Image: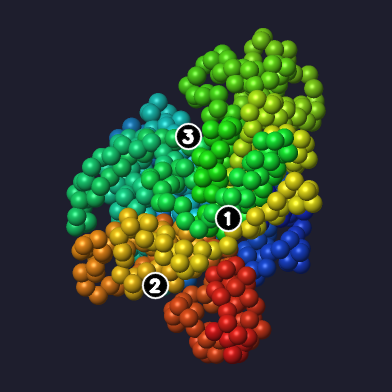
Amino acid sequence: MDVAEWLRGIGLEQYAPAFRDNDIDGEVLRRLTGEDLRELGVASVGHRRRLLDAVAALGNAQLGPGAPLPPAPAFAPVEAERRQLTVMFCDLVDSTMLTSRFDPEELGQVVGAYHRCVADVVRWFDGFLAKYLGDGVLAYFGFPVAHEDDAERAVRAGLELAKAVAGLDGRGVRLSARVGIATGLVVVGEIGGGEPNAVVGETPNLAARLQAEAPPGGVVIAPATRRLAGDWFRFRDLGPRPLKGIAEPVPLTQVLGERPAESRFAAIHAALLTPFVGREQEIALLLQRWHLAGEGEGQVVVLSGEAGIGKSRIAETVRERVTADGMHIRWQCSPHHMETALHPVTAQLTAAARIEMEDPPATKLAKLEQLVVPSDPGSEDAVPLLADLLAIPTGDRYPPATAVPEARRARTLRALAAQLFALSQRRPVLFLVEDAHWIDPTTHELLGSVIEPIAQHRVLMLVTGRPEFPNPWSSYTHVTTLALNRLGQRQSADLASHVAGGRELPEAITRTIISRADGVPLFVEELTKSVLESGLLREVDGQLVPEGPLPPLAIPTTLQGSLLARLDRLAATREVAQIGAAIGREFDYELLTAVEGLPDAQLRHALSRLEAAGLIFRRGSPPEAS
């Protein structure tokens, strides 16, 4: 049984690493107790209850290797709340024709296979299957648990869905689906005693209208989804179109497919970057480590910080500054491939060799040989190992593999490490490992195997990760941990001015941006962009002047997912955060106690968890705290 997939199916995939590290397989899973879950780090009572209910739902299911995954239990109704949601509406093309072609029993089998296909794809990308509407399916991404990349997940799911439905057995009829995706603020949950997990807002209606505009097998998205999808995909602009029930024409975009991107940073920030502000000391330290590496004293730097703090921007700046003196390799870890062995490695090899999906096997193999052999003339033995890793048939070019899987795996890891060090013999190498908090176990093992020998090679390994990624190599003298702090007020003001193109923002707006961004560079940028795009400011003699009273700053769409994901990881304390925010940006302990009504110990625990997560900051000690 794939326990990680089972956790994903019940919306609690954040516990997959803890289950894996403690050897929780399908058999052990069936015997877990509440005390076991506490020892695994499941602090939330609600999460423990959901896990125990899901374990009970497994019943007597056979959990041996290859056994089918039992259906995940439905989520309990959630109290209605306001949140950003990406909604996907999928419909089977020409369903009316199918009703005239098949008898009801045959039609039921075809539609049933289609529904199962949609459910599998939506679950795989951590979406929530809301309801079936005949041959239409409504799904949410960002509920009941948000991810910072829900729009991207929805688009990937839409593309996979279009492909999967086309491959279904339509009993002589070629099946296809249309998909519409929209993102926006909604109220979702149990609304007014009606059906559970309902959505109120324009977003689901827009998704349904977009689905009707999509060609067979096509995916059409709304403007907000397009902004959030970044540069991960190839798009076709369909222009503004009038949609029923929506006042103004809506610019539509069709998603044509995925686009390879070297890094998540490049995909999300494909547009022109703002000038670099406030990280001169960190850049200087990294360039000094690069100089040491160039002299043969290999270095490792683990760059740690919260989302939006500037890790990837620093890595990209260093890459730009050292390109003339050396080469770079980038392994990009992905939240979608945390259980896929060596995904960052295979993605980098495929891109470096310029291997295309449509290439015939012989061409793929030739491209791989051209990449590997020149870098290390003695590496012919590595080619069949790397070809096997990339699922490229070698035919009779190389002897068939005879080693047992464990030995072949070890040889493959050694070959990958040897390739890195062979490259450093030619030129210094900047080895970037991005977003290590999403690293898969096998890639993590491979990194661990090269840490010590790097000290004797011309390599600077720069690992970026969030605080939850610990630095397991800190005992080595050539390894440095660099934690990024938030920007100061002056630096935040400078960054906001840069985003505004050097124009002077109203002082009140600048103060508000600085206050709300809390020194996180991404927040400064997005809040400033939100103000500039609001149309509430006009330029007069190089200064931006408000047209009238400015409304309170809304949280930009680009930040909603990240903040919701952080709150959802603290589900048991989320209501405390929501009540505090409703009181105001600052609130005192006594007032919160009166409104919330929780026992003192429970409230203090909730506030401590929110404080540890960086979502609130405290002055004083309860009950004299604010």
Count residues near mark 2 (Cα–Cα under 10 Å), then give few for <14, some for 14-19, many for 20+.
Answer: some
The tag on residue 401 is none
Label 1 sits on residue = 281
Mark 1 or mark 3, which is nearer to you?
1
Residue 116 appears in the figure: no
Q: Is residue 467 left or right of residue 65?
A: left
Q: Earlier in the sequence, mark 3 or mark 2?
A: 3
The local secondary structure at tag 1 comes to helix
Of tags 3 and 2, which is closer to the observer? 2
Q: Is residue 78 above or below residue 279?
A: below
Q: CA distance from mark 1 to mark 3?
A: 33 Å
How far from the left and from the top, in percent, is residue 331? 60, 38
Foreground of the two, 281 or 556 = 281
Q: Label 3's element? A: loop
Q: Amino acid at mark 3?
A: Pro
| Residue shown at the point (71%, 39%) measured from the top left | 298
The quarter of the picture where the N terminus appears is top right
Residue topped by disc 2: 511
